Amino acid sequence: MIIETTIGLLDDSELEKREGVIDNENEYSTWVEYWQHGVLVHRSANVKLKSLAAAKSEIGEF
Amino acid sequence: MANSAGMCSSFKAELMEGVHALGPGTLTPARTVSVPDTVKAALFLVTASRTAADTAYSTTGELAGTGSYTQGGVTVTMATAPSASGTTGIFTPTASFQWTTFTSSGAFDCCVLYNSSQSNREISVHTFSSQSVTSGTFTLTMPTNDATNALLRIA
C-alpha cells in the first residue's frame, strides 16, 4: 500500500507502522503512524465523539 | 389523564431550526426563508481556550492553514433536520468532518461548531484527546443521532 508521507509517496513495506486506540467515556479514537528510521513521516487519526452533556431545559412556576 | 408541566419536545427541536423568535429580538430578524444557515466546524490547538462561554468563532488558537486545512474549518453537512427523540431535541450532522493530506500546525484537541450565516455565532465546543496529523487525514466521525448520542441534545 502506498502511503503519503512527509517525504513523498512510499510503500508501507519500507515503513514501521504503529497504531493506537483511545476508548473512554468521551470518545473512541484510532490513530495510525508510519515511521522511517526513527522519524515520524505520517500520522492520521479518527475521532468518534461519545456523549456530550445535553443542555438541560426547565420551565418556571407561577 | 392529568395535566403535566414541561417544555415541549417539539419546541426543543424547533429551537435548532430557528422556528421560534421569542420577545422583541435585537439580534436576528424574523426568518422569512426556509434555507438553513451554513454551519462550520473548525479545529483548535490544545493551547487554545475555547469554552461554552464563547459567543462567536474567532481564529484565536485555531490551527494554521496548512494543506487541506483552511482556517474557518469545513462546512457541516445537514441533510437531516433537528428532531425530537422522546423528550429530547436532537441534531447530528449527516456527514463526518474530514481533512485530508495536511500536517497540523500543532497538537489539537477541540472542534468548534459555529453559524457562519449568523455573524459566526458559536454553537458548541467539543473536546477530545490531543491529536496531531502528519501528512495524513483527520476525521471526526459523527455519533448516532439519538437521544443518548446525538451531537447536539436539548433534554
Image (cartoon, coloured by chain):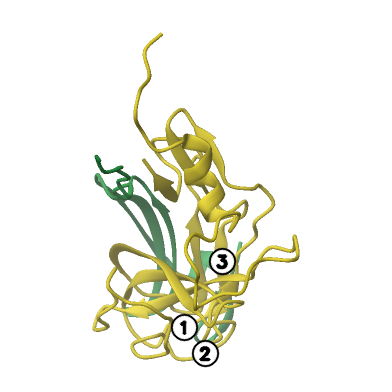
Chain colours: A green, B yellow
Label 1, label 2: how many angstroms apart (C-alpha)? 6 Å
Question: Could you say which is closer to the camera, residue B42 or residue B90?
Answer: B90
Left or right: residue A22 versus residue B133 is left
Q: Position of residue B154 (x, y in %)?
A: 40, 46
The residue lying at 28 percent from left, 50 percent from top is A26
Quarter holding the N terminus of chain A is bottom right
Q: On the picture, is B65 further left or further right than A9?
A: left
Local packing at callout 3 (Cα closer than 10 Å; few below 14, some 14-19, many 20+) is some
Give the numbered dot on residue B135. Answer: none
Amino acid type at image mark 1: Thr
For discs 1 and 2, the disc positioned in front in the rendered view: 2
Q: Nearer the viewer, mark 1 or mark 3?
A: 3
Residue at the image position 26 percent from the left and 78 percent from the top? B46
Mark 1 or mark 2: whose residue is earlier in sequence: 2
**Tags 1 and 2 in contact by the CB under 8 Å rule?**
yes
- State left or right for residue B89 relative to residue B6: right
Q: Which residue is mark 2?
A: B66
Residue B103, numbered circle: 1
Q: Position of residue B30 (x, y in %)?
A: 63, 68
Image spot of residue A29 (x, y percent): 36, 53
The answer, for residue B46, to whether it is visible in the render is yes
Badge 3 and badge 2 in a common chain: yes
* Residue bearing the label numbered 3: B98
